[in-house]
Amino acid sequence: MTLATALAEPMPGISPDVYSSADFRAVSQIAYANAGIVLEEGKAMLVYSRWAPLVRASGCGTFSAYIELIRNDPAEQTRAVGALTTNHTFFYREPHHFEHFAREARPALLRRLQDGQPVRLWSAGCSSGEETWSIAMTLLGEDAAPGRRLAGMNLRMLASDIAQHALAKAAAATYPAADLEPVPAALRKAWTSEKNGMATLSDTARDLVRFRTLNLHGQWPMKGRFDIIFCRNVMIYFDTPTKERLVARFAQALAPGGFLYIGHSERVTGPASAQLRPAGPTIYCRSAA
């Protein structure tokens, strides 16, 4: 192998004519510019494994040809960037968030609904839906009858992600029953049904949620403010300036007194710190000002 070939080859066994270091750098630039995702040098294999099926399906044959294709095809670019995201999640992840939500946030939301006011929640970066449905079940509560009455009020949840394949799984709302074991049994009983080892969310829960493709790094079409925002284990893929811009936007999107829930390794820093006060481990409350 020549020195030039070694420098061009991002990993052994893959021809640089198909996938080179220059291709990896181009992918990294696209991911950062479009979604704020930082791809470090050690992610070359991840990029190859996520994009190789897309390259083959496109008929391009090489990564460089596919990169040129997506530069002029916004829909394919969204699909390609979405393929780079890691959709690892599970039901009732970080239980203290749901315990806080049920204990501290839910009673005020119920009062608002009973007074005829709207309640809006957002599962941002919802991935394959486990977080979204954990929120929905916790909000509806352990008793199905009053939960159904709540669902008939002015209550809606937005669940968004950049990865369309993850959204499709989330919207299907069907998972191996064993995956729901972390959810309290009373919530599972009230809002899921099981058949042949698979659990499906009830129509009542499903009717609450609107799934949408949304790039957190781009424009947000939503007009009103949210009472609750969950965005957990998403910002770990961003650099500090991108994180701080995103959290500042979340602060503006929250209604006064609303709660923001973020991942266990994430923190609120930057300008948003003036508007978001800690309310628990990785839980923040929007100030009235």
Image (cartoon, rainbow, N blue to C red):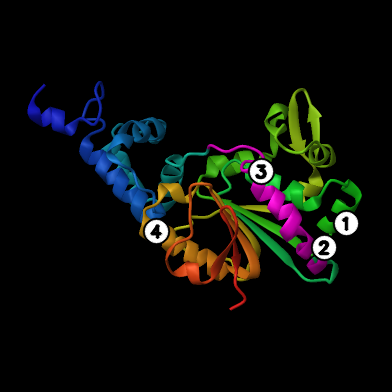
Counting other residues with Cα less than 10 Å from the Cα at mark 1, is it few (<14), some (14-19), or many (20 or more)? few
Q: Choose mark 4 or mark 2, whichever is in front.
A: 4
Looking at the magenta stretch, what is its main secondary structure?
A: helix
Q: Amino acid at mark 4?
A: Thr
Please provide percent x and percent y for residue 233.
51, 46
Please give the name of the residue rendered at 75% of the width and 53% of the height, measured from the top-left corner: 102
* Residue 68 visible from this viewpoint: no
Per the model, the C-alpha gap separating discs 2 and 1 is 7 Å
Contact (Cβ within 8 Å) of mark 2 with mark 1:
yes
Q: Choose mark 3 or mark 2, whichever is in front.
A: 3
Q: Amino acid at mark 2?
A: Met
Please provide percent x and percent y for residue 208.
74, 53
Question: Reading the chain from its start, which is encountered first: label 1 or label 3?
Answer: 3
Q: Which segment did they paint magenta? A: 88-112
Question: Residue furthest toward the bottom?
Answer: 289
Per the model, the C-alpha gap separating discs 1 and 3 is 26 Å
Magenta run includes residue 107: yes
Please give the name of the residue rendered at 55% of the width and 49% of the height, measured from the top-left corner: 232
Quarter that holds the N terminus: top left
- Label disc, if present, on residue 120 of the rendered structure: none
- Label disc, if present, on residue 95 of the rendered structure: 3
Magenta run includes residue 135: no
76 and 122: which is toward the camera:
122
Residue on which disc 2 sits: 153
Question: Residue furthest toward the right?
Answer: 145
